[in-house]
Amino acid sequence: MGYDNNNIFAKILRGEMPAVKVYEDDATLAFLDVMPQAPGHTLVIPKVGAENLYDLPVEAGAAVFRTVQKLAPAVRDAMGADGIMLNQFNGPAAGQTVFHFHVHIVPRFDDVPLRRHSGQMEDSALLEEQAEKIRARL
């Protein structure tokens, strides 16, 4: 398919679309999912254009997972979660809908089912509250 510079994450990286950011460094950006499956559902993306794992330079992948390791405990603790689920999809058949490599950090709670990753957007004020809690744990 080839990398599309007009995907939503590329636009977020260029500042053309808003995002509720929780962390940023030279190689990665982390922000809250606007259609979260659980409170604090965070996405980590590389700043390089890579459609999926197959296109991702090794150095960019290492940077993404350094950020995931840094953020996962902060997300867990900020949301009071019992655990963290990591998801990463490659291709439509695997469930990938945004074709820029990304890792989902999803807080999990005992006996609470995941919400559907629907087309319903979360309230931006609530997302900002959650992001502030996560940022405070970093």
Image: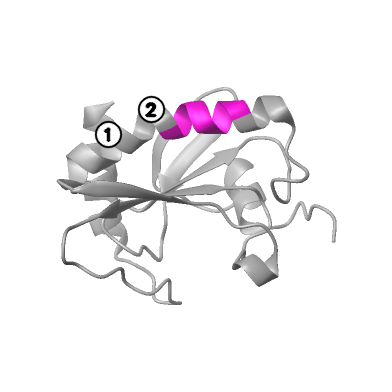
In the picture provided, is 11 more to the left or to the right than 66?
right
Q: Mark 1: few, some, or many residues within 10 Å (few <14, many ≥20)?
A: some
Q: Residue at x 63, y 33 (%)?
A: 61
In the picture provided, is 135 more to the left or to the right than 105?
left
In the picture provided, is 14 more to the left or to the right than 80?
right
**Residue 35: x, y in percent?**
40, 66
Magenta-highlighted residues: 62-68
**Residue 65: x, y in percent?**
52, 32
**Residue 111: x, y in percent?**
16, 66
Q: Residue at x 60, y 51 (%)?
A: 9
Q: Is residue 87 magenta?
A: no
Secondary structure under badge 1? Answer: helix
Q: Residue at x 18, y 48 (%)?
A: 82
Type of the residue with mark 2: Lys
Q: Can you tell which quarter of the image residue 27 is in? A: top right
Type of the residue with mark 1: Ala
In the picture provided, is 86 more to the left or to the right than 54?
left
Q: Main secondary structure of the magenta part?
A: helix
Q: Residue at x 38, y 27 (%)?
A: 70
Seen from the viewer's position, the closer of residues 9 and 113 is 113
Q: Is residue 67 magenta?
A: yes
Residue that mark 2 sits on? 70
- Above/below status of 11 relative to 64: below
Locate the N terminus and report the quarter of the image it occupies: bottom right
- Above/below status of 43 relative to 71: below
Q: Can you tell which quarter of the image residue 113 is in? A: bottom left
Secondary structure under badge 2? Answer: helix
Seen from the viewer's position, the closer of residues 30 and 92 is 92
Locate the C terminus and report the quarter of the image it occupies: top left
Q: How is the image coloured?
A: one colour
Q: Are marks 1 and 2 in contact (CB under 8 Å)?
A: yes
